[in-house]
Amino acid sequence: MHRTIVWEGDTAFGHFQVVDGLYDGRPARVLYSGDGQAAQSGVPLDNKPDLLFDYNQRLLELAVNLAPRSILLIGGGVGTLPAALLQAVPEVRLAMVEPDTALLQLGHQYFDLPVDERLQVYATDGRSFLREHSTRYDMVLVDAFHHATMPRELKTVEAFQAYRRHLRSPGVLAINLISGYFGRGSQVLDTVYAAAIRTFDAVDVFRAGAGYSLWLPQNFVLTAQADSDWPLGDYLRHAAVKPPEVGPERALQD
């Protein structure tokens, strides 16, 4: 499949490309930030049921099995995960927090993001939303990145306290993060896990994909439960990994 740039331009947050081509061996339409540097969102152009990105599929699996009535999604880009959630969880009402309104427009134009009364979009950043709103949700999902980096203000103890305040009891938080597992490259996983165990009752780390490296950066899904101990491993395709051997003192502070 030839690589075709469908759209290219700048938003207030950076330079982006919408590209049709192969991604991980599948024909797909992908949103890249920079000059094709980091894949931000994407949809498959084949007939296979799985979402294009493994971590999105893991978040979708959680939502389908837990069947929440309400979800807060911090991040979302062009809306590929929200579109899948609205289709797979018919009763859900979804609040999507995305500061880049131009990406939302691209979502409607190129990525089948629907206009749906169950989807409410907030054009602000995650930290501001958490501070300015008090609504509580059955699930909170975090998939917020600048290129391949999760904003620091969404990884702190204060952020995790805010996540918990926005969860009903019982409730589940799930975060997509990119990190190594061992060594210097594990800093993101270590600090996010440390903040989670300071704030939540049950915390697990799952591989997002089938491939697994002890050292190279990869996607993990961290889950944290408020006032519950659901067997989330039963709902996800890949088993949990041994959690980092770090204490809560490793957590970041605002």
Image: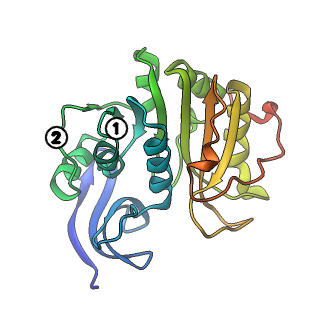
Amino acid marked by disc 1: Glu
Which secondary structure lies at badge 1? loop
Numbered disc 2: secondary structure: loop
Residue at (60% x, 28% y) in the render: 160
Using the numbered discs, state the Cα–Cα distance from disc 1 to disc 2 in whole angstroms: 15 Å
Asked where in the image residue 94 lies, by quadrant, the reply is top left
Residue behind mark 2: 115
Visible residue check, residue 72: yes
Instruction: Say if mark 1 contacts mark 2, CB within 8 Å.
Output: no
Kindly indicate the quadrant of the structure image that contains residue 119.
Answer: top left
Whether residue 30 is visible, yes or no, is no
Could you say where residue 77 lies in the image, as x and y percent from the top left?
Answer: 34, 48
- When the figure is inspected, residue 68 is found, relative to residue 217, above or below; the finding is above
**156 versus 208 height, above or below:** above
Measuring from the top left, give residue 15's x and y in whole percent: 32, 57
Mark found first going from the N terminus, 1 or 2 = 1
Disc sitting over residue 17 in the figure: none
Q: Tag 2: residue type?
A: Val
The quarter of the rendered structure image containing the N terminus is bottom left
Q: Is 86 located above or below residue 207 in the figure?
A: above
Which residue appears at 76% of the width and 47% of the height?
Answer: 243
Q: Nearer the viewer, residue 218 or 242?
A: 242
Residue in the image at 73% along x and 31% along y:
197
Relative vertical location of residue 147 with respect to residue 210 in this rendering, above or below:
above
Give the residue pinned by disc 1: 98
